[in-house]
Amino acid sequence: MKSLKTLVIAAALSLGAVGAGHAQAPAAAPAEAPAATTAANPAPAAADVAAPTAAPVATEAAVPAGDATYVPMKPTPGVGQPIDAGIDFQPQVSPVGEQAYWFNHVILLPVITIITLIVLGLMLWAMFRFRAKANPVPSKTTHNTFIEIIWTAIPVLILAVIAVPSIRLLAQQYEPPSKEALTIKVTGYQWYWGYAYPDQGIGEYVSKILTEEQAKAAGEPYHLAVDNRMVVPVGRQVKLIITGADVIHSFSVPAFWTKMDAVPGRANETTFTANKVGVYYGQCSELCGVDHGYMPIAVEVLPVDKWEAWVRSRGGNPAGPVAAAPAAAPAAAVATPAATPAATTTEAAPAAAPVAAPVAKN
Ligand SMILES: [Cu+2]
């Protein structure tokens, strides 16, 4: 029994070590986070005010004729949102989510069920077979080497079999994003979310819950519907840089198998790739104050051309870093030799992008 306990602890520690190893990548970022956070703090108010006036002008100017203009998509019932009396995970639309779903349903649930039934059967058999009435003279057996080897070896084998897909899934969730990933900065506020697309030159806009009447009118579920969604292209990896402005929040979208804490002073990173067009909802998943339950998340996954139309409707440049790179590069080059903190360089890039974008267009 002791050896089994040791084994379980060892397995837990090794899993923890793998997790910690992978977690180190995002941990490198905190140095720049405080600067970014403080800089972003006053932004929402400014962005809030600026967006309504700036956006319509940009839309008319930027959307080419014949191109689809952005109209918020209607959600599909039962997809990307909870269902009444549901006990299963939401249908997964990301590769990591699909693998996690498979791992749970094909490996974990059957193993749990079989072990539970075997243990229950053994207990019932022992209770009946060795009851006092049928055994007036109790057995004095204390050890059985063969049985002890068996009940140590079998759990070891089960854990070893589970560890393979488990560690593979864990590693996959923390894989660094590819260079082509779309970067979105996510900031948790009391009590709403802020989204910015630095490479596309889209400054932070805020995303707030709709009232019950507004949600009904929009044909969306109340408590999940928001005024401004996060919009991403289908099939492209999305890199989220997540931080908190005031207290700890947690950005979570169950259909993508995505959850990451938004911690003030830290820039946490996570990725997802949505491989199905649609609207997917999530919620803040860290108790963050009185309106914690009223800061939902809505992510709209669009075909690439429609996503590009959305970016233009926000006054951004869908090509993003490709067009902005030449203009931004000198600023970065100047900052690097000076060996100033990383924050200078990162701050310079988003600032340069909006400036570069209109130039590239005209
Ligand atoms: Cu929150």
Image (cartoon, rainbow, N blue to C red):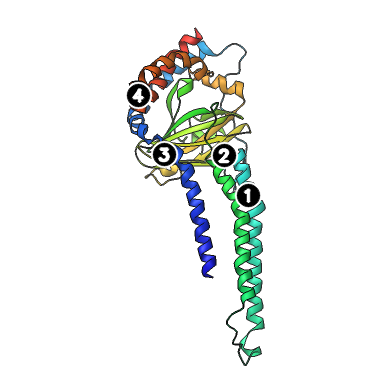
Quickly name the residue at label 1: 103
User: Farthest bottom residue?
Assistant: 136
The quarter of the picture where the N terminus appears is: bottom right
The mark that comes first in sequence, 2 or 1, is: 1
Quickly name the residue at label 2: 256
The label nearer to you, 2 versus 1, is 1
Quarter occupied by residue 218 = top right
Three-letter code for the amino acid on which mark 3 is drawn = Ala
Instruction: Report if the CB atoms under discs 4 and 2 are less than 8 Å apart.
Output: no
Question: SS at mark 2?
Answer: helix
- Ligand 1 within 8 Å, label 2 CB: no
In space, the residues marked 3 and 2 are separated at their CA atoms by 23 Å
The label nearer to you, 4 versus 2, is 4
**Residue at screen point 49% across, 21% down:** 200
Q: Nearer the viewer, residue 162 or 77?
A: 162
The mark that comes first in sequence, 4 or 2, is: 2
Question: SS at mark 4?
Answer: helix
The label nearer to you, 3 versus 2, is 3
The mark that comes first in sequence, 1 or 3, is: 3
